[in-house]
Image (cartoon, rainbow, N blue to C red):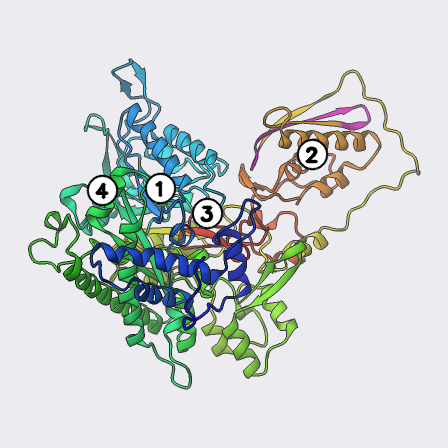
């Protein structure tokens, strides 16, 4: 590894950042031990990307340019997307985060795309698809005389292929599926993820058209059109379809929506094709076989110090110009996974420069996120970045030429002579913002204080540094107060917090859904591509609240929307609210009937009676058989997965111990209370309730069996409200619900159309 020039700065990284880098970014040996330091990673990336400049100017001082690239990364002012940090200067050399692949209406095309998807996922990229060209379910296949199975069936094949590909141990495959709202299978598509154990590697969004939006406005019907024949096959009420979309988003956060006509109104190269899909998080609309290289500027690094903080636009402008040149270079040193992608990526030279740390910037400036001043600042800073970025692209074009497809673009006649067909994108920055030590994207803070799990299961309170500093300066800091804040989602719920501080340090659930959308729209005004953002709702939000946000997004010019209602997808005790230890304490008290020191189980009778129930779990369909004899419950059998597998064996062991306990006289209600609430990393929805694990499913099945026969002491059926399950009334107000990180168990942050763990850097899509 080359030595770093002595006058260059070393990065100042938080413990969280170091953890994420060591886990997911730094080069490792065969034993999985990191063999480079963070500064070495930045220098590796900087030198590799700078080398592209020699293609245009053989006499250029590559090391000087590498120093410039290194400096903006080491100062945490700019970060390229994760594949660039991971792979630049290494054997793989695949540096793009997002791709779109075509899905044509032939078996050959479908499975060719599946093969290409596997190659992209293996290299660390995410993929987007439009399934709108596939013929609907039940349509005739003339070549075979068979019946088509429809887009959703093929999405499941893509999902299985993604599951099978491990992305070099660093990134998990992520997909976007879009179906036009006028496709005949649109209802099946909208409801495809009501069962959250299927299509787990897909985000899904409905592609809304202007025709549909007009029909919705007029409370009218619109046409469903067969893509194979191009003929109208039915007419349906727009309101009914929109209600289904809203219902799904309210229940599980999906489907999202994208406005197809708006994507194509901003298509810089319409002569090359129509934009039908986006990357997995929706911020990057792309033509088939296109890729985009993304990067984000950390806005929190561009505020001058007190007593009169303001945005340092001069320094920000310099960083924007360096970042544009960096991203343009990436296009040339990138080793694309497919020749078609290489041709299109270099033909259009799309880049996507975005931001992170916006919420931190507002806090430094003393501006509440959800204020008019916050919206104005968002629009002003993005306008500056977009304008400066376009000027930088023109400067690079003067040296190296416009993008090769320029004459086929909307700029050919009178537009600026750009090096890049697009310049700006607001992308997810989950793990990047952890490395940079700032808030993610343009989102408000996730939490002011949260629990981070460290080695050996220990938990550490993390306090937002600006809040900690202000609390100490103004004399209201205490460890007890920080713990109280950690248990709540809002400073407004915590006594002793000054009002002005409470309004400044707002979190995602303090900000109204309307304000979320207005902020997204403010940034979209000055963004070439799209904006990745999540509109967060509290658990008590209604379907009408979701409907209003979707319509407001259309009214304000957004290109798409992703929503998440707290607790709607999976249940997990939010570590913003006490963590797993508190849950264990809340459910600690169980009653077991005292028995003699030695107990022998009664014999199993020859004939038993009972029932079998099927329950959806995160591990698959679990079949639970509960039998009884004359004395009561006597045995439980479970069947799941393939015989001999780990899941099946664990499930069988649990059932055997339950059966032994039942025939030994242990109170069934005590068994129920021991099993309910046990969690695994993959909870799932089943008939309106949450199943936390296979053990949890068995406990609840026994409870339902007892209740249906009138023998449960508790005598209560499962509630339909997941936020009330398995917790004492006194504890419910202190807990929130979000998914758990499958790697370290910390709460996952749901934002930017993605999920990310701030402890270990796990991410589903960034």
Q: Earlier in the sequence, mark 3 or mark 4?
A: 4
What residue lies at 29% left-to-right and 24% top-to-bottom?
108
Q: From mark 3 to mark 4, how far is it between C-alphas?
A: 28 Å
Task: Residue under label 4, please give it.
Answer: 343
Reply above or below: 639 against 253.
Answer: above
Q: From mark 3 to mark 1, how far is it between C-alphas?
A: 12 Å
Of 550 and 257, the residue lying toward us: 257
Residue 127, disc: 1
Of 298 and 326, the residue lying toward us: 326
Q: Residues within 10 Å of mark 2 (few under 14, many from 20)?
A: many
In this view of the protein, can residue 343 be seen by the observer?
yes
Q: Earlier in the sequence, mark 1 or mark 4?
A: 1
Q: Position of residue 250 (x, y in %)?
A: 44, 47
Q: Which residues are magenta?
A: 616-634
Left or right, 666 with reference to 120:
right
Task: Residue under label 3, please give it.
Answer: 764
Mark 1 or mark 4, whichever is nearer to me: 4
Of 458 and 533, the residue lying toward us: 458
Q: Quadrant of residue 144?
A: top left
Q: Earlier in the sequence, mark 3 or mark 1?
A: 1
What residue lies at 32% left-to-right and 77% top-to-bottom?
312
């Amino acid at each position: 590894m080359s030595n770093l020039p002595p006058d260059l700065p070393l990065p100042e990284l938080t413990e969280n950042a170091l953890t994420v880098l060591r886990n997911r970014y730094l080069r490792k040996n065969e034993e999985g031990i990191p063999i480079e330091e963070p500064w070495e990673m930045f220098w590796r990336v900087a030198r590799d990307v700078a080398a592209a400049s020699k293609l245009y100017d053989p006499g250029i001082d590559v090391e000087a340019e590498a120093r410039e690239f290194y400096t903006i990364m080491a100062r945490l002012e700019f970060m390229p997307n994760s594949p660039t940090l991971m792979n630049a200067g290494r054997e793989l050399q695949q540096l793009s985060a997002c791709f779109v692949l075509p899905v044509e209406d032939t078996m050959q095309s479908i499975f060719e795309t599946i093969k290409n998807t596997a190659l992209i996922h293996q290299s660390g990229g995410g993929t987007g698809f439009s399934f709108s060209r596939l013929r609907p379910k039940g349509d005739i296949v003339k070549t075979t005389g068979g019946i088509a199975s429809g887009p959703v069936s093929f999405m499941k094949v893509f999902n299985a292929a993604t599951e099978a590909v491990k992305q070099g141990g660093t990134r998990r495959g992520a997909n976007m599926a879009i179906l036009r709202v006028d496709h005949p299978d649109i209802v099946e598509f909208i409801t495809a993820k009501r069962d959250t154990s299927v299509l787990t590697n897909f985000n899904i969004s409905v592609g809304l058209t202007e025709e549909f939006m007009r029909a919705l406005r007029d409370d009218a019907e619109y046409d469903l059109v067969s893509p194979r024949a191009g003929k109208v096959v039915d007419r349906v009420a727009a309101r009914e379809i929109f209600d289904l979309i809203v219902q799904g988003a309210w229940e599980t956060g999906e489907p999202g929506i994208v406005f197809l006509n708006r994507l194509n109104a901003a298509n810089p190269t319409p002569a090359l094709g129509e934009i039908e899909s986006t990357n997995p998080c929706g911020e990057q609309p792309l033509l088939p076989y296109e890729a985009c290289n993304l990067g984000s500027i950390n806005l929190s690094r561009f505020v001058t110090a007190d007593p009169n903080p303001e945005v340092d636009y001069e320094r920000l402008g310099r960083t924007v110009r360096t970042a544009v040149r960096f991203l343009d270079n990436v296009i040339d040193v990138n080793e694309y996974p497919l020749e078609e992608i290489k041709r299109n990526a270099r033909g259009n030279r799309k880049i996507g420069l975005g931001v992170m740390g916006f919420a931190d910037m507002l806090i430094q400036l003393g501006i509440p996120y959800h204020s008019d001043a916050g919206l104005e600042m968002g629009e002003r800073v993005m306008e500056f970045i977009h304008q400066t970025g376009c000027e930088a692209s023109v400067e690079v074009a003067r040296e190296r030429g416009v993008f090769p497809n320029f004459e086929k673009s909307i700029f050919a006649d009178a537009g600026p002579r750009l090096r890049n067909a697009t310049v700006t994108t607001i992308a997810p920055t989950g793990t990047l913002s952890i490395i940079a030590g700032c808030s993610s994207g343009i989102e408000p803070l996730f939490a002011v204080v949260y629990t981070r799990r460290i080695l050996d299961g220990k938990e550490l309170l993390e306090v937002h540094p600006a809040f900690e500093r202000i609390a100490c300066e103004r004399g209201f800091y205490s460890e007890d107060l920080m713990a109280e804040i950690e248990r709540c989602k809002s400073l407004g719920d915590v006594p002793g917090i000054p009002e002005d501080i409470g309004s400044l340090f707002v979190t995602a659930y303090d900000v109204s859904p309307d304000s979320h959308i207005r902020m997204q729209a403010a940034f979209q005004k000055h963004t070439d591509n799209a904006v990745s953002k999540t509109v967060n709702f509290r658990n008590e939000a209604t379907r009408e609240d979701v409907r209003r946000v979707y319509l407001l997004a259309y009214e304000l010019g957004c290109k798409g929307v992703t929503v998440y209602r707290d607790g709607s997808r999976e249940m997990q005790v939010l570590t913003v609210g006490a963590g797993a230890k508190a849950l264990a304490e809340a459910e600690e008290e169980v009653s077991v009937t005292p028995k003699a020191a030695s107990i022998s189980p009664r014999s199993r009778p020859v004939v038993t009676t009972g029932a079998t129930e099927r329950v959806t779990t995160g591990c698959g369909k679990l079949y639970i058989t509960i039998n009884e004899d004359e004395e009561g419950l006597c045995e439980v059998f479970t069947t799941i997965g393939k015989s001999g597998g780990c899941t099946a064996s664990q499930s069988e062991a649990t059932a055997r111990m339950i059966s032994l306990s039942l025939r030994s006289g242990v109170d069934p209600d005590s068994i129920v209370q021991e099993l309910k609430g046990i969690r695994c990393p993959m909870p799932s929805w089943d008939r309106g309730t949450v199943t936390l694990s296979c053990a949890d499913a068995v406990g609840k099945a026994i409870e339902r069996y007892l209740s249906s026969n009138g023998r449960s002491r508790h005598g209560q059926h499962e509630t339909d409200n997941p936020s009330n399950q398995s917790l004492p009334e006194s504890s419910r107000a202190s807990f929130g619900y979000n998914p758990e990180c499958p790697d370290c168990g910390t709460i996952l942050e749901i934002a930017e159309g993605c999920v990310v763990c701030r402890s270990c850097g796990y991410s589903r899509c960034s």
